[in-house]
Amino acid sequence: MAGGPVRLISAGRLEFLAADAATGERLGRVGLGPRGDGTAEIGYWVDPRARGRGVATDAVRAACRWAFATQGLELIEWRAEVGNVGSRRVAERAGFLIEGTLRKRLRRHRGVRVDAWVGSLLKEEMP
Ligand SMILES: CC(C)(COP(=O)(O)OP(=O)(O)OC[C@H]1O[C@@H](n2cnc3c(N)ncnc32)[C@H](O)[C@@H]1OP(=O)(O)O)[C@@H](O)C(=O)NCCC(=O)NCCS
């Protein structure tokens, strides 16, 4: 892995692959789920071999900047299961304000409902 900056490759209307800008190696994914009301929910995943070197933070920042600039969004929401500290840290590093805990708001395997942390990034807060 060359460790260059992250480049986003379109993989759908609001879906991207995160690739190493120097080598093209696929490092992860980031996607936005639009709700049709000027808001969208973000999700991301990084290959275990590429974790811990800022890939998710870079990819989330780039995707949010692009989405605010081109998709008419006013707010991007982040949700993750309570305890997913890595996801929360990425959201915070990308500028999201953690707003609280939503009870039983996520569905996990076999339909089990779990509590979720929720946060948001406003267009005017885009770093
Ligand atoms: C969460 C995930 C996306 C992080 O990806 P990453 O590229 O390793 O994250 P970054 O390198 O950008 O890390 C950003 C910050 O988060 C911290 N962090 C990352 N993973 C962490 C973990 N498991 N526990 C604690 N902190 C973590 C880093 O130390 C860094 O913090 P710092 O700026 O204070 O040093 C990755 O572990 C993953 O894909 N997990 C499984 C899927 C998932 O949970 N997705 C999120 C659901 S929305």
Image (cartoon, rainbow, N blue to C red):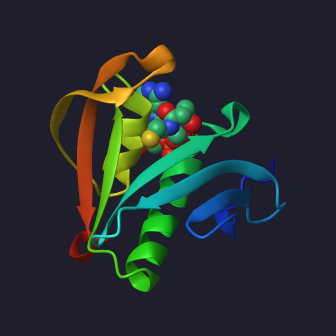
Which residue is at the front of the view, 16 or 4? Answer: 16
**Residue at the spot 43% in from the left edge and 32% down from the top edge:** 86
Which residue is at the front of the view, 122 or 1? Answer: 122
Image coords of residue 76 (percent x, y):
32, 61
Image coords of residue 38 (percent x, y):
29, 73
Across the whole image, how many numbered discs are drawn on residues? 0
Rendered view: 32 above or below 73: above
Is residue 116 found left or right of 90 in the rendered image?
left
Q: Quadrant of residue 94?
A: bottom left
**Residue at the spot 24% in from the left edge and 47% down from the top edge:** 119
**Residue at the spot 69% in from the left edge and 37% down from the top edge:** 47
Image coords of residue 55 (percent x, y):
59, 50
Q: Residue furthest left?
A: 100
Is residue 20 found left or right of 103 in the rendered image?
right
Q: Quadrant of residue 99?
A: top left
**Residue at the spot 49% in from the left edge and 15% down from the top edge:** 110
Rendered view: 102 above or below 96: above
Q: Quadrant of residue 59?
A: bottom right
Image coords of residue 3 (percent x, y):
72, 53
Which residue is at the front of the view, 7 or 74? Answer: 74
Is residue 48 found left or right of 68 in the rendered image?
right
